[in-house]
Amino acid sequence: MLRCNLNCLALALLAILIAPAFAQEKSFKIPPVELKDQIIWGSVCESSDGLVFGFGGQDQKSDELPRTRVKIDGQWTSQSAELRQKNPLQKYHEKCQKLALAVRDATSRLRYLYFEGDDLDKLPPALEVERRKLAETCRMEWATLKEDFQSALRTAAVYEKRQLEHALSKISELDTLSAAGKEFSLDGQIALEQVCVLLDAEPPARFLSPLVYDPQTRLFVLTAGDHGDYLTNDLWLFDSARKKWEQRHPSSAPPPRGSHALKANGDGTVTLSGGYTYTSSTDYVGAQYRELNDGEWTFDIIANAWKGPDQGVASDTRVYRTGPFHPNYFLQGTNPNPTTVKNELDALPGNLWVERKPPHKPEMVRTWGHAVLAPDHDLVLVFSGGHSAHCGSDVLHYHLATNHWELTSPVEFPLGQTYSNTSYPEGFNLNKRPWVTGHTYQSYNYDPGSKKLYLNARVDDTYVYDPVIGDWIGRFPKPKPMVYNDCFYTLNTLPTPHGLICWTGHGGLFQLDAQKQQWLEIKCSGDQLPNAEVDSSTFVYDSKRDRLIFIRSDYGKKNEGHLHFCDVKTGKVTKMSPTNATAVANLDLKSVDRAVYDVDHDLVLFSTLLPDDSGQPRRALAYDCAADKWQSLAISYEIGKDQRPAHPAGPGHSCGLLFDTKRQIIWGIDTHNCRVYALRLDPATANRRPVE
């Protein structure tokens, strides 16, 4: 049932998802913010009696979303806790939030099964019981909420009664979705979020939404704004004397937008103009925002009505990005088929990089990062981009079993910081996700013990991602040696049976204790471990010998062919030069920075290709662990139309090499443009020979 519903939903939204780009419209340039400020993208307004009032933005130092606040004696003070305490509907809001999280988790679980190719019309008995139990639980919760709302209506004050009536209307939408078997969908999540909004003591957090004060009604007015993943056109009034927000629901409203102008006219009306909407551009450094030049819109506070150049749209509307920036884009087409994919992979020839061609590919380049394997979930995870590449906070899932990409949530961009080099906010955004950094390089990886992904690219904290729910779930402080401004370049991470290990730009080693959420320093002895270097360092785990193998060269310099080894149990570091290290040095290789250990062949394979002027596929660099010798292999690949090798290394240090023990395949992910390659390595028939 869900499989059909997911596809139907995708087809129903196809007209939106393939909407034409607004290339002919003027792009909207959001100015960058001063990242030294603790709260960015918020709004401040002063009343006629001197009250300094603020709302929204992102707090770079606190996990709490910055919403309602006032300035007292020069210091900002949050009013959120007091507002929640006084709100008679807050207990329903909290219940609804718990339900929304349950629906999110269930949606993620069932969507995962869909992309893994399970026939959701004929689930295995245990999974079918799980699905039905989840659906029944949600229906019971909705029914309880309806009963609570109807009971509360009898004694509610005027405003609370109005909010409850709107909430009941939204609950009816959920009933309709449930009856159609679509309770576990993005539509269901959004409907629940909107119910939560109706019951909350204050507006949802937002960016770039100006506040104004109307002297006639003595009210602050807030309308529209950017949540990061969606734009809204809701409208709220704050009475500072009563310390209370009131949401209004006019019959129509201006289209959703952010960074608009809002002016109080002094007569009980406010005027809105300008601002931006999304473009969903997939062009290289494409304009992600389009100017809304739709005239002036005036709201009459007493009459509760907008007047503008046209009829407007429904109030409390949301606008999301479309196309490959929306999860439903990847639900289009035929259902994932693991049997077909298995047959294709079983038929792979030896020693040839074969490009896999999923039905839908993520757009916008995600350069200068890598990809990691999550074997417990049979996924490849990609969190890459930044600078002039994709700047979203989303983690891509590639399903190995079905050759499908999955996007778990609508994409959000960091406003005026998009396409900047290293100027990205710290802390959580409004969806409790970290923004991408200048690039991500090898700063994140999957920990097989905790079954989570850990990101070290942010300066102060390690962020944790749960592939099961497809979202970020928390953060914890890094130790001082891992805290430096350009850490995303050189905090290389690697999974081992001992936990994740991080190699720093200062030559340190740290081991993750996932249970305690802390990094513990590995005390090294013996030879000096070199520092991890940007663009020219990587390390692998040799599982046969329980050791780490490091390779690096100075930035922009040729690789000298030396290796460092570290015994994981003892921390002893040994510098060694394979017998033919000089031959590697003579090749003048630079940027040797991606590798994978193939346990079946006791071989380290690098993404680096050796020089060759013949125009034929260039030989691949490898290290034979048993023989302690640099070798080269004849691994074929296609030559693209642009004369570049169709090979996972990709341009701009954008590569992940992953050994899949389940299938005995090496996966190569060109993260520049999300191209996926599969290799069945057979060194015995790859014209294996020492580098000379």
Image (cartoon, helix red, strand yellow):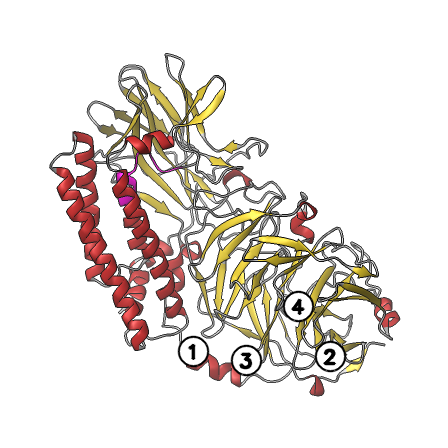
Question: Which of disc 2 and disc 3 is earlier in sequence?
Answer: 2
**Which tag is nearer the camera, tag 2 or tag 1?**
1
| Quadrant position of the C terminus in the picture | bottom right
Q: Is residue 294 above or below residue 358?
A: above
- Between the residue at mark 2 and the residue at mark 1, the CA separation in whole angstroms equals 31 Å
| Quadrant position of the N terminus in the picture | bottom left
The answer to whether residue 562 shows anywhere in this view is no
Question: Which of disc 3 and disc 4 is earlier in sequence?
Answer: 4
- Residue 668 x/y as whole percent: 60, 70
Task: Say which quarter of the image contains residue 620.
Answer: bottom right
Of the pair 12 and 384, the residue shown nearer to us: 384
- Between the residue at mark 1 and the residue at mark 4, the CA separation in whole angstroms equals 33 Å
Of the pair 337 and 172, the residue shown nearer to us: 172
Q: Around disc 3, counting alpha carbons within 10 Å, would you say few (fewer than 14), some (14 to 19), or many (20 or more)?
A: few
Q: Amino acid at mark 3?
A: Arg
Q: Amino acid at mark 4?
A: Gln
Residue span colored magenta: 194-205
User: Mark on residue 643?
Assistant: 4
Residue 544 in the figure: left or right of residue 21: right
Q: Which residue is mark 2?
A: 633
Q: Around disc 1, counting alpha carbons within 10 Å, would you say few (fewer than 14), some (14 to 19), or many (20 or more)?
A: some
Q: Around disc 4, counting alpha carbons within 10 Å, would you say few (fewer than 14), some (14 to 19), or many (20 or more)?
A: few
User: Mark on residue 663?
Assistant: 3
- Between the residue at mark 4 and the residue at mark 3, the CA separation in whole angstroms equals 31 Å
SS at circle 1 = helix
Q: Which residue is mark 1?
A: 338
Residue 186 in the figure: left or right of residue 645: left
